[in-house]
Image (cartoon, grey):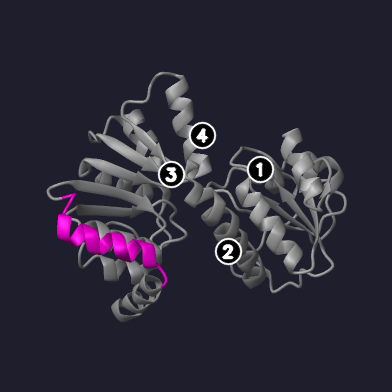
């Protein structure tokens, strides 16, 4: 398992040229010497390269996952040679939060994805971080809510507001990976299908663009009128979710908001419609509503 993880890390490293230059600079300057950095990110190869870079800069890194289902155990094992890692695939909810608490107790600064570390610190008072970075749209929403309530205890850098993040990672990275995930999970042909993208932010733009590239007929649902017009002028059909529910074959949520797809939408959908969420948390599709109207719940493919 260790060898498999190292292979993944080295492969990712070859394609991360900018971080490689930063790493060489950090190796010489040691800007994080004596500093403990806590991380809650998806524990996969690219994150491992980031951890290596921070360690090269002198940091003592404590890492856990921001999602129990995305941890790659071989990568976690490999990176545990240089960092304190508390994460494994399939953690229970209790284990997940205990791992977050462990990281908070050992952090001077935190790097967060979804703001679970930041919010847990504010709820339970664990640890005393001096500052944080937050990666996602969903996490930024949670941090902004704390700030509006005047409860935010330390500075937070919104990485998601960086042009390098939303122009490239959100649009091209998320756009490609969401389509790849749907195709691998469902083994379905997208060409000719009605593909509904809910939310036309940078992630939604990327998903719509890639779905069209696969031959799908893309429909965009967007509550912001300016973004809705932008989607229309980009060549996509635009309609309300209530209308799209009747004709969609695939539905992908990319809003960062709660209960975007609900009971009234499920009742209108075609038999065999496929639902997917591109947001960080699993709250955009109301699973409780879906379960309540279901006659049977079973796994038909891995992750489906």
Q: Is residue 173 visible?
A: yes
Residue marked by disc 4: 141
In the rendered view, tell whether residue 275 sits above or below residue 80.
above
In what element is the residue under mark 1?
Answer: loop
Q: Which residues are magenta?
A: 15-32
Disc 4 is placed on an element classified as helix
Q: Residue furthest top?
A: 150
Q: Is residue 139 magenta?
A: no
Give the residue furthest to the left: 34
Badge 4 local density, few (<14 within 10 Å), some, or many (20+)? Answer: some
Between disc 2 and disc 1, whose residue precedes?
2
Q: Position of residue 131 (x, y in %)?
A: 29, 36
Q: Residues within 10 Å of mark 1 (few under 14, many from 20)?
A: some
Q: CA distance from mark 4 to mark 1?
A: 19 Å
Q: In this rendering, does residue 88 appear at all?
A: no
Marks 3 and 2, how far apart in space? 20 Å
* Mark with earlier residue (3, 1): 3
According to the picture, the residue beneath numbered tag 2 turns out to be 177
Name the image quarter holding residue 239.
top right
Question: x and y percent of residue 151 in the render?
Answer: 38, 21
Residue 123 falls in image quadrant: top left
């Amino acid at each position: 398992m260790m060898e498999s993880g190292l292979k993944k890390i080295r492969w990712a490293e070859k394609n991360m040229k900018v971080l490689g230059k930063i790493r060489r600079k950090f190796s010489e300057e040691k800007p994080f010497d004596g500093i403990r950095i806590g991380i809650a990110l998806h524990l996969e190869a690219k994150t491992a390269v980031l951890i290596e870079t921070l360690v090269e800069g002198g940091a003592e890194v404590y890492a856990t996952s921001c999602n129990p289902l995305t941890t790659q155990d071989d990568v976690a094992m490999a990176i545990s040679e240089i960092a304190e890692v508390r994460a494994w695939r399939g953690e229970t909810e209790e284990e997940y939060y205990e791992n977050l608490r462990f990281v908070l107790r050992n952090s001077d600064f935190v790097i967060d994805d979804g703001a679970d570390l930041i919010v847990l610190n504010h709820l339970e008072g664990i640890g005393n971080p001096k500052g944080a970075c937050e990666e996602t749209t969903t996490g930024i929403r949670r941090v902004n809510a704390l700030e509006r309530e005047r409860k935010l205890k330390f500075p937070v850098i919104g990485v998601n507001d960086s042009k390098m993040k939303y122009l490239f990672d959100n649009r091209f990275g998320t756009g490609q990976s969401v389509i790849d995930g749907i195709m691998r999970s469902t083994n379905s042909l997208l060409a000719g299908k009605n593909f509904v993208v809910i939310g036309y932010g940078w992630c939604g733009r990327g998903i719509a663009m890639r779905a069209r590239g696969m031959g799908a007929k893309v429909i965009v649902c967007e509550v912001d009128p300016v973004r809705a017009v932008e989607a229309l002028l980009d060549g996509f059909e635009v309609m309300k979710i209530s209308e799209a529910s009747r004709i969609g074959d695939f539905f992908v949520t990319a809003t960062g908001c709660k209960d975007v797809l609900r009971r009234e939408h499920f009742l209108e959908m075609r038999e065999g419609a496929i639902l997917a969420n591109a947001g960080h948390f699993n709250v955009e599709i109301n699973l409780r509503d879906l379960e309540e109207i279901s006659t049977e719940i079973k796994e038909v493919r891995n992750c489906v």
